Image (spheres, rainbow, N blue to C red):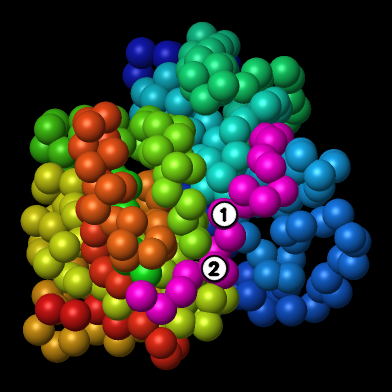
């Protein structure tokens, strides 16, 4: 029997939603140690080291970026779900410095879900792919009791224009292009603690493509870029620090939060991804005693369709901030890079 579109809540059909559903990063690291890296001259980015997407060089002027991402519902509205899932996948291409070209849907839905809801998911994803500059050209759908949706995306980039995670250098400034707290806000909603305004803002940020931010960044030639998603700010900062062989210093009072997220953290709200992120990154992250528990929770909060974490030479920072401001885009300097190892969060 088909479910009633007016009453079904997509999040009730999922054990956890969005990027909080990611497999444990610590276990993933252990799993990937068993893989022998592919040796191929034209494979510019693969598993040695892994990044936000794979990159394969076609010729001296063109390289293909290939990524995929999917997850259970993080919201109940079908159109929001489709748009957010598409944004999360497309943002991997922007995080590598490229532009999307073609996408395919990856979908799993209960057969009982109304066709209308599925149509809304696909239509919203299609609109988001087009807004990113690509085309949604098909996909694959299977039956599953827990809904899941996402995209496989191919993009293009110049072989010399790739933004890796491992390029941060001592003396760089660290920037973030979206506030944090989507996991906290959505978990608070399930507990009845999130008001309408924080929820609306979180959904708006999750639907926001990193396209405009990436367009501005290309003129700044960043040293390292990644998007902040399921491993949280501290987890992704650890990846940048570890792979670049540097220390990333984050300033707690400059870490931006979606309105209401820190209040929820103070009330003890956490996602199921929080302990997994701590298991992955905590031994590499030093948090000064003056830093509040709420900021600590915000840093480990898994983000869905989060912003770009950017490392670029400090002297280019002022111009970058001016460019973002002139386009009314969010940007916050949250730290810097030093010689050393690990991540340090200062009060």
The magenta stretch spans which residues?
Answer: 153-171
| Residue at point 89%, 60% (across, down) | 41
Viewer-side residue, 185 vs 100: 100
Magenta span contains residue 156: yes
Q: Based on the displayed image, in which of its 4 quarters is residue 171 positioned? A: bottom left
Mark number, residue 144? none
Residue 344's x, y, as percent?
30, 82
Q: Quadrant of the C terminus?
A: bottom left
Q: Nearer the viewer, residue 309 or 268?
A: 309
* Residue 21 position (above or below residue 268): above
Q: Residue 198 in the image: state x and y as whole percent.
A: 16, 38
Q: Main secondary structure of the magenta part?
A: loop
Secondary structure, mark 1, is loop
How would you rate the neighbour count of disc 2 (Cα within 10 Å): few for under 14, some for 14-19, many for 20 or more?
A: some
Q: Is residue 310 left or right of residue 328?
A: right
Can residue 279 be seen in this snapshot? no
User: Which corner quadrant holds the N terminus?
Assistant: top right
Q: Is residue 329 above or below residue 274?
A: above
Looking at the image, residue 265 lies above or below residue 56: below
Q: Marks 1 and 2, Cα distance to the nearest angstrom?
A: 8 Å
Q: Is residue 226 left or right of residue 335?
A: right
What's the residue at 52%, 25% (across, down)? 132
Query: Residue, x 72% and y 48% (percent of image)?
Result: 159
Picture coordinates of residue 116 (x, y %)? 51, 9
Residue furthest toward the top? Answer: 116
- Give the residue number, with chain letter if any, for mark 1: 163
Res 256 visible: yes
Judging by the rendered image, the residue that carries numbered circle 2 is 167
Q: Quadrant of residue 301?
A: bottom left
Q: Is the C-beta separation of discs 1 and 2 under 8 Å?
A: yes
Circle 2: element type: loop
């Amino acid at each position: 029997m088909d479910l009633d579109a007016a009453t079904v809540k997509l999040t009730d059909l999922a054990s956890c939603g969005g990027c909080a559903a990611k497999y444990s990063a610590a276990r993933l690291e252990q799993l990937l140690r068993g893989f022998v890296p592919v040796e191929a001259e034209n494979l510019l980015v693969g598993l040695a080291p892994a990044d936000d997407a794979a990159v394969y060089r076609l010729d001296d002027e063109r390289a293909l970026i290939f990524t995929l991402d999917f997850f259970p519902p993080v919201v109940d509205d079908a159109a929001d779900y489709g748009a957010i899932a598409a944004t999360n996948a497309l943002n991997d291409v922007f995080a590598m410095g490229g532009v999307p070209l073609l996408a395919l849907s990856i979908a799993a839905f209960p057969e009982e879900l109304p066709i209308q809801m599925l149509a809304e998911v696909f239509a919203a994803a299609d609109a988001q792919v087009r807004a990113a500059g690509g085309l949604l050209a098909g996909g694959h759908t299977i039956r599953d009791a827990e809904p899941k949706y996402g995209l496989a995306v191919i993009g293009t980039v110049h072989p010399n224009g790739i933004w890796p995670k491992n390029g941060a250098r001592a003396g760089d400034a660290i920037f973030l292009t979206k506030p944090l707290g989507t996991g906290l806000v959505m978990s608070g909603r399930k507990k009845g603690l999130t008001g309408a305004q924080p929820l609306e803002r979180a959904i708006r940020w999750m639907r926001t493509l990193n396209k405009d931010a990436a367009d501005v960044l290309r003129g700044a030639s960043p040293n390292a870029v990644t998007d902040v998603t399921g491993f949280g700010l501290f987890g992704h900062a650890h990846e940048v620090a570890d792979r670049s062989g540097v220390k990333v210093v984050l300033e707690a009072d400059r870490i931006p939060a979606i309105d209401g997220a820190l209040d929820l953290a103070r009330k003890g709200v956490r996602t199921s991804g929080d302990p997994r992120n701590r298991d992955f990154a905590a031994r590499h992250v030093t948090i000064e005693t003056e830093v509040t528990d709420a900021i600590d929770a915000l840093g480990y909060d898994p983000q869905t369709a989060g912003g770009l974490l950017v490392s670029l030479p400090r002297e280019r920072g002022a111009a970058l901030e001016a460019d973002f401001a002139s386009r009314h885009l969010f940007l916050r300097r949250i730290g810097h890079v030093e010689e050393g190892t690990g991540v340090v969060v200062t009060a």
